[in-house]
């Protein structure tokens, strides 16, 4: 099967990644990370979210981040908004893109957003209308697209039904979130096949966690179905506070390494992306979760040691 020649990588580390960190990350550090990511060639970087600080305290400074960010007019810096209050805060921060989110599991929806799936759609209708009125791009997230930590397997039809409703609100793209990282390629393809009957494949994106080490395999399976947009998180940052045991999003460096190896164009510089991952990992006091980033760093250290040995000989 012919794979897409070009893939868009959406960087979610500054939002979906950092929001689960217990250590408080300063606005200055977040701004520096976002700007480093933009310098790597990424053109869409989640900058934060306007949600209640009570629920996601790490995102309490999103307005400060947006105010201090040196924005490239050719790039997008979306923020997550849960309702009209969040949208109004995004509008005041001069955001050019907002994201809305819903879950394909009733239990997860109530635990995550304190409302039913149907209520979440109703809540987003005025947000979608306001986004159209202000010419702000709207992206949609559907989470829990394969398994739910509370309900178990999710029927592909349920995901398709919700994705269709989210897309109908005016989203330019719907990101399909495999939130707890239990899916395997065949299940991902079955889910995509169901959704593609309602939403064009060209309007779909994949968002896969790597709990069981299946994220890259699931991305490849999605590429085989024609999906050409994927969310990833630099250094493998992130998890899900409402999905016990779920580890981070797939690392951006690992995704890029695979795409480069497949000859798929992304426009992203690996060295600069890895440097951004090393930067935020150092701030957090740990090594990147990305295997590619670790290999690149080890290779650089070995080359530096060899050069020093040669110079002293």
Image: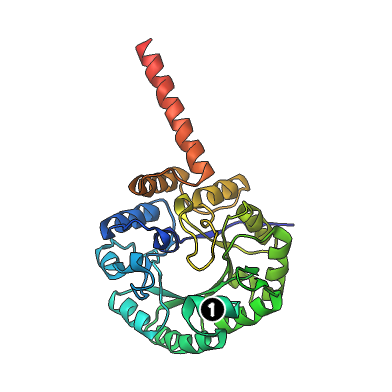
Q: Is residue 262 left or right of residue 279?
A: right
Residue lying at 50% horizontally and 48% vertically, measured from the top left: 253
Report x, y in % for residue 132.
Answer: 43, 85
> Is residue 81 placed above or below 275 in the rendered structure?
below
Report x, y in % for residue 269.
Answer: 45, 47
Colour mapping: rainbow
**70 vs 165, nearest the viewer:** 165
Q: Quadrant of the C terminus?
A: top left
Q: Quadrant of the N terminus?
A: bottom right
Residue 101 appears anywhere in the view: no
Q: Is residue 88 left or right of residue 113?
A: left
Residue lying at 61% horizontally and 55% vertically, measured from the top left: 215
Report x, y in % for residue 81.
Answer: 41, 77
Mark 1 element type: helix
Q: Quadrant of residue 209?
A: bottom right
Residue at numbered disc 1: 109
**119 vs 232, nearest the viewer:** 119
Residue lying at 35% horizontally and 52% vertically, measured from the top left: 36
Q: Quadrant of residue 90?
A: bottom left
Q: Is residue 19 left or right of residue 149?
A: left
Q: Quadrant of residue 244?
A: bottom right
**227 vs 251, nearest the viewer:** 251
Q: Residues within 10 Å of mark 1 (few under 14, many from 20)?
A: many
């Amino acid at each position: 099967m012919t794979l897409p020649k070009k893939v868009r990588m959406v960087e979610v580390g500054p939002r979906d990644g950092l929001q689960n960190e217990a250590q408080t990350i300063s606005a200055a550090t977040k701004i520096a990370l976002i700007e480093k990511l933009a310098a790597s060639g990424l053109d869409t970087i989640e900058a934060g979210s306007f949600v209640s600080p009570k629920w996601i305290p790490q995102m309490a400074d999103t307005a400060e981040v947006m105010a201090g960010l040196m924005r490239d007019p050719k790039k997008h810096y979306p923020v997550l908004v849960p309702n009209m209050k969040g949208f109004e805060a995004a509008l005041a921060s001069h955001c050019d893109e907002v994201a809305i989110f819903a879950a394909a599991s009733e239990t997860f929806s109530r635990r995550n957003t304190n409302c039913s799936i149907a209520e979440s759609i109703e809540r987003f209708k005025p947000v979608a209308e306001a986004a159209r009125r202000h010419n702000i791009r709207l992206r949609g997230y559907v989470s829990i697209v394969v398994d739910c930590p509370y309900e178990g397997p999710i029927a592909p039809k349920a995901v398709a039904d919700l994705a269709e409703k989210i897309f109908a609100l005016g989203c330019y793209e719907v990101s399909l979130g495999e939130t707890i990282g239990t899916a395997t390629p065949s299940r991902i393809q079955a889910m995509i096949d169901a959704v593609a009957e309602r939403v064009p494949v060209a309007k779909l994106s994949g968002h896969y966690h790597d709990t069981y080490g299946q994220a890259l395999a699931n991305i490849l399976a999605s590429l085989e179905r024609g999906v050409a947009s994927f969310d990833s998180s630099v250094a493998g940052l992130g998890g899900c506070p409402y999905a016990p045991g779920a580890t981070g999003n797939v690392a951006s460096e690992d995704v890029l390494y695979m795409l480069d190896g497949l000859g798929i164009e992304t426009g992203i510089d690996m060295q600069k992306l890895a440097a951004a991952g090393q930067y935020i990992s150092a701030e957090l006091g740990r090594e990147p979760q990305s295997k590619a980033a670790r290999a690149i760093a080890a290779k650089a250290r070995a080359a530096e040691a060899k050069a020093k040995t040669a110079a002293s000989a």
